[in-house]
Every structure is written in C-alpha cells, then in structure tokens.
Image (cartoon, grey):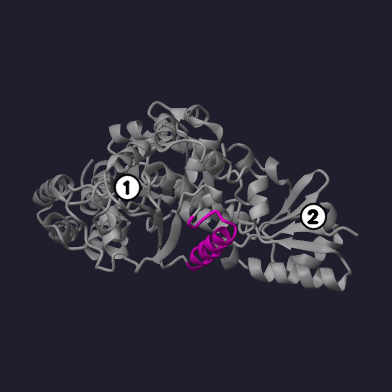
Amino acid sequence: MKAVKIFVPRDSASLALGADEVARCLLEKGRLRGLSIELIRNGSRGMFWLEPLVEVQTSKGRVAYGPVQVNDIDSLLDAGLLEGGEHKLGLGLTEQIPYLAKQERLTFARMGIIDPLSLSDYEAHSGWKGLRRALTLDGDSIVQEVVDSGLRGRGGAAFPAGIKWRTVKGAQAEQKYIVCNADEGDSGTFSDRMTMEGDPFMLIEGMIIAGIAVGAEKGYVYIRSEYPHAIEVMSEAIQICLSQGFLGSSVCGSGKAFHLEIRKAAGAYVCGEETALLESIEGRRGIVRAKPPLPALEGLFGKPTVVNNVITLASVPLILNQGAAFYRDYGVGRSQGTLPFQLAGNVKHGGLVEKAFGITLNELLHDFGAGTRSGRPIKAVQVGGPLGAYVPQSQWNVPLDYESYTAIGAVLGHGGIVIHDETTNMAKLARYAMEFCALESCGKCTPCRIGSTRGVEAIDRITSNKDKQQQVYLLRDLCNTMKDASLCAMGGMTPYPVLSALNHYPEDFGIDV
C-alpha cells in the first residue's frame, strides 16, 4: 500500500504552537492503527491562526485541517484523515482557502508546499531555473534583467536593486561580496524568517545569481541570533548545495565560483542598517559608518559589496526564470512586483499576505485580517516596523506603494503591519518609539543618541501637563532635527511614529483637538 503524504509545518510559529508534538502523535497513532503515512515537514502557509496546519495529499489535491492539537489526532483519523474526510477542523482544499486564494504568491509560491530541504522538491517547483538561465548570460545582461524588473530593496529603503548591482559590477576590485541582511528586527515582521525556514534554496539561488552578475565569489548571510531554526535550516541547505555542486569552486560545473557562509548577529537592532551590519561581520561593534563611501564601492573588508535583504534576493530567481516583464507587470507605478505583508498585533487572522503593490490597508485589515482579535474597533495601524508611522482610518484607502506612502509621510518598510484597537494609548506608543531609539542607538551621532533621550523627557512633560504647549513645540523641533541630521534611519525614522501619533491622535496627549 502506497504511503499517504501528510504535511506538518516545521516553521517556528508552528513549532511554538505544538507542531512537533502533533507530528510525533500522527506517526505513533498511525503506526498503532497500521496506517502507511509519509510525514513531510513543510514550511508554513502563513495562516498563523490555523497553526499547526495539517495537510493530507488526496486525489483531489491537498486537504487542510487546523488548528490541530494532539488530542485531535484520534478523531481526525476516525474521520478518515488519510482520505481527506470531513471533520470539524476541516478547511477543504488548501489552495481554495480564501486567505490563500486571494493572494499573488510569487516569492512565496513554494512556501508550505515543499519540504524546505528537499532538492528534488525544489527542482520540481521551478528551482534553479533562474540560476541556469543566469549561467547562459553575461553579468551585464543579468543586471539589466533586474533593473528592467523594477525590483527595489524590500528591506525598507526601496532603492532599485539593479542599480546597486550595476554599481558593484562596475567597481574595480580583486574581491567583491554579496551580503544578505537577514537581521529581521522589526516588530511584527517574519517574512525573512519564513523564507529561510520554508524555502532556503530560493535565497541561496538568488545570492548565487547576484554573485555571478557582479563578479563576487563570496557571500554572507547575516541572520539574527533570535532565529535558531532559520540558522539551522540555512546551514543544512548550504551544505546540501555544496555537496550537489550548486555552491563551491564551480557552480553547476560552470567554472564560476561562489562560496557562502552564515554569520550570526549579536542582537543589536541597529545592525539591520547595512553599514553597522558590515562592521559586525568584520568582528567589530555594530556602529553606523558615515557615507560616502557607499558599501557598493567600499563595503565589507573595504571591498565592493551588494547588501540586499532576504526578500530582495529571494525575488531574483523568479525574475531570471520568468523574465523582467513578468515581474514588472505586478504592482503600480514605480512600485513593481509584490510585497509580503505581515499582519500582526491585535488581529484576528494574523499571518503573511503576498500581494501586488496597490492593495490598501482596508483590504488587508478586513478581507485578510478579519479585524481585531479583541473584537474592538481598530484605532491605529503601524506600517513599516517600530519606526514606521501610525496610519489613521482616514488613510486606510491610500494604495500601499512606496510613492503613495511617502506622500502621506509614512513608509512601507519591510511590510510589517501591526494593528492596535481603540483601547491603545498613542502617547505611550510615541514614548516607546523614543525610548526604543535611545536603547538601540549605536551612539555614534548626537541627534539619535541625545535626541531620543530628550524626546522621552518631552513626551513625559506633555502627558504630565507641564508647560504643554512649549513641550509640543520642542518635541516637533527635536523630531525635525533627528530626521534631517541623523547618520542613519535609526534616528532619522524615529520621528515617524512620534509625529504621526501626535498629529492624528492629539487627544491621547491631552491636547485639545
């Protein structure tokens, strides 16, 4: 009898909710019943309120059940789990679940479908096609493909990836580097972690293509220390690629070399900034470097370096495989392609939603997120991480693209979206932003180091009704100084949550509207 394939995620979120215990119980109960089960540990589909999500391969397709706990296993097996039988936890065909069916999954096309560490699975789902095409092209052609795709940095700055690659390619040096910024430190973000845990070969393929394009033979993945499972999966994936000739002195027998290593971050938020990250890889304290020189010309160990985040590099194999036009046709204006939006905070259906640029917050909050978990009305939505602006309801129909959000004084950042209900005190959140900056500042520049400390003090005086009008003026002036004079985005973006809270929710500061 042919074994039935059952899928249980190995994603960190799933593990935290009991996926390992569910997997062990399924195997044990199946053994006792004499059932033939092939258990596959896949990545998460990104529907975290349904984790652990168990799927079974049937003649009609994969059928999903969730959230499954150990005490559900017997009743699931009794209901005919292996045949996709009906059960109270049944969700029907996985691909038809509305949360998934309404997405445009390009970068996350394999997520939750494959065994993350199976090369045969990866190849069966278009893996390595982008690399094999890249190996038939010269560096200029690869770079031009990325330029033409419109791909911009998905780490927050949104700088055109192809322009950065072109700069590195044109630099003259005997050694160049590709650095992947996987120091995903923003609150409410998890797309980088999901990628490394659920589809690691995609990231590796993107880094190899980048290396071939610019003439770099060495790469580093800088992963935050709080991601032990991502580090484990990426380490194993690199070893598999080495053993199968996808990494090493001759990639796929091409004679072109690319070597890849992992560097574990030490936990500093500021190391998400590219120059502080480079300092950390070099073994020094993570302190922001003054620019110029740009890392593209003098980066890691003083050599030309491409620094891109996980989703940027992971988007490259698809672009090389399907062509620039395919990717460019998604999105709006200069915001092309898709972005994995991450719904977190006080939300009923938290998880990952990959959509083309141009979707609105209203659609994400209600069509996907289903409102707040508390059931109370949504009051504010922070977009773009802990240093992103709080977006009020009056702006929830603004298209989510880089230019539209810049126009309203907000940022998309890494695509993190954190929801707050009506009980939230926005003055406290504004204070937290300043305090966060004070704690995480590398200390190199005065506007960030001192400005954030003075900002906490000013907010405390405002909420204590001490010389309120003058303190509001002082806080605004301080924010302008931090935006204009900080060395990096740490200090330069801290004013975004502070000013947006002050402008849109003055009543929480005790200010008359």
For the residues labelled 2 and 1, say whether their Cβ atoms are less than 8 Å apart. Answer: no
Q: In the picture, residue 302 is in which quadrant? A: bottom left
- Residues 498 and 422: in front is 498
Report the Cα–Cα distance between label 2 and label 1.
42 Å
**Circle number at residue 87:** 2
Q: Residues within 10 Å of mark 2 (few under 14, many from 20)?
A: some
Q: Secondary structure at mark 1?
A: loop
Q: Earlier in the sequence, mark 2 or mark 1?
A: 2
Q: In which quadrant is the N terminus drawn?
A: bottom right
Find residue 404 and report its horizontal and vertical position in percent: 34, 31
Q: In which quadrant is the C terminus drawn?
A: top left
- Tell me the kind of residue under disc 1: Gly
Residue 374 position (above or below residue 332) = below
> Residues in magenta?
228-249
Instruction: Identify the residue under disc 1.
Output: 388
Q: Is residue 500 left or right of residue 161?
A: left
- Tell me the kind of residue under disc 2: His
